[in-house]
């Protein structure tokens, strides 16, 4: 099957290679069979809108491959990124299940494979398979922890430097340990980091430059290496 945007298609939920990962797709075979029957799969380039703030929901979106940013906007046009969603996440549950308008916008950050499930079909999946309901509860719990982190980062940090240090440390949790430090891939632009942390783009650029001069981090393209984790942690409020 030829798929656009350089994606590697995941055609069958029952044989999906992401089953080994901790995601919504990690379900028993009968549940995956039903999921395969009720989903509608599409492929999107970077910058595509899956749904927008204020729109009435028709269902939920299962992110099979790619990354999606969830963001809110003020009437003045100021944007705040809530978090970045990855493969296996179900987007739009908070609106679709109660039938309320979406409270944020979902936009692909890179080419993505997304499966759409009508609300009634998604609810049927949850009703028939307790494992699916348990997975949804786990995802909601993860979203709550992410919201708490966002509040702590935005409201309780003493400075922009502390916000950016927290962000880098959190981003490195899934990184790779090397001789030079913890290395991870950072696909966000400085503007997107600013929207995520509630600071200006100029502040992000200036602070990252300062961190590099102080040998706390090194940056090469989209690869970031935390060279002095203790030093970054020292910037956090007690």
Image (cartoon, rainbow, N blue to C red):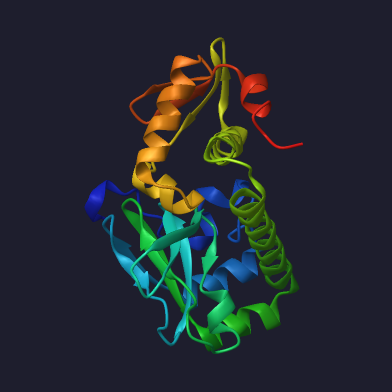
Q: Nearer the viewer, residue 92 or 35?
A: 92
Q: Is residue 129 left or right of residue 196?
A: right
Image coordinates for residue 157, horizontal then vertical, percent: 63, 45
Q: Is residue 44 left or right of residue 140?
A: left
Image coordinates for residue 130, horizontal then vertical, percent: 75, 73
Q: Quadrant of the N terminus?
A: bottom left
Q: Quadrant of residue 193?
A: top left
* Vertical relation: 10 (above or below) 35: above
Image coordinates for residue 81, horizontal then vertical, percent: 46, 58
* Vertical relation: 157 (above or below) 11: above
Q: Is residue 189 visible?
A: no
Q: Is residue 98 visible?
A: yes
Q: Quadrant of residue 168?
A: top right
Q: Nearer the viewer, residue 88 or 26?
A: 88
* Vertical relation: 72 (above or below) 111: below
The single residue placed furthest to the front in the displayed view is 158
Q: Quadrant of the C terminus?
A: top right
Residue at 53 percent across and 83 percent down: it is 96
Image coordinates for residue 207, horizontal then vertical, percent: 45, 31
Residue at 56 percent across and 10 percent down: it is 179
Q: How many marks?
A: 0
The single residue placed furthest to the top in the displayed view is 179
* Vertical relation: 70 (above or below) 102: above
Q: Quadrant of residue 230?
A: top right
């Amino acid at each position: 099957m030829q798929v656009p945007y350089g994606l590697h298609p995941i055609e069958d939920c029952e044989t999906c290679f992401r089953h080994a990962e901790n995601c919504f797709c990690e379900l028993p075979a009968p549940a995956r069979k039903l999921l395969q029957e009720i989903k509608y799969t599409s492929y999107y380039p970077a910058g595509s809108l899956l749904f927008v703030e204020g729109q009435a929901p028709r269902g939920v979106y299962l992110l099979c491959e790619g990354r999606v940013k969830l963001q809110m906007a003020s009437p003045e046009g100021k944007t705040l990124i809530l978090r970045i969603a990855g493969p296996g996440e179900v987007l739009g549950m908070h609106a679709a299940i109660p039938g309320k308008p979406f409270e944020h916008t979902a936009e692909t950050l890179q080419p993505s494979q997304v499966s759409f499930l009508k609300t009634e079909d998604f609810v049927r999946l949850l009703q028939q398979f307790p494992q699916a309901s348990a997975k949804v509860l786990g995802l909601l719990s993860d979203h709550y922890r992410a919201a708490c982190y966002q509040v702590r980062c935005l409201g309780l940090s003493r400075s922009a430097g502390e916000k950016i240090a927290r962000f880098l440390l959190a981003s490195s949790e899934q990184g790779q340990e090397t001789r030079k430090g913890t290395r991870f891939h950072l696909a966000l632009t400085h503007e997107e980091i600013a929207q995520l942390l509630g600071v200006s783009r100029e502040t992000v650029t200036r602070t990252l430059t300062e961190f590099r001069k102080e040998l706390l981090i090194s940056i090469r393209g989209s690869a970031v290496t935390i060279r002095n984790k203790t030093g970054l942690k020292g910037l956090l409020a007690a």
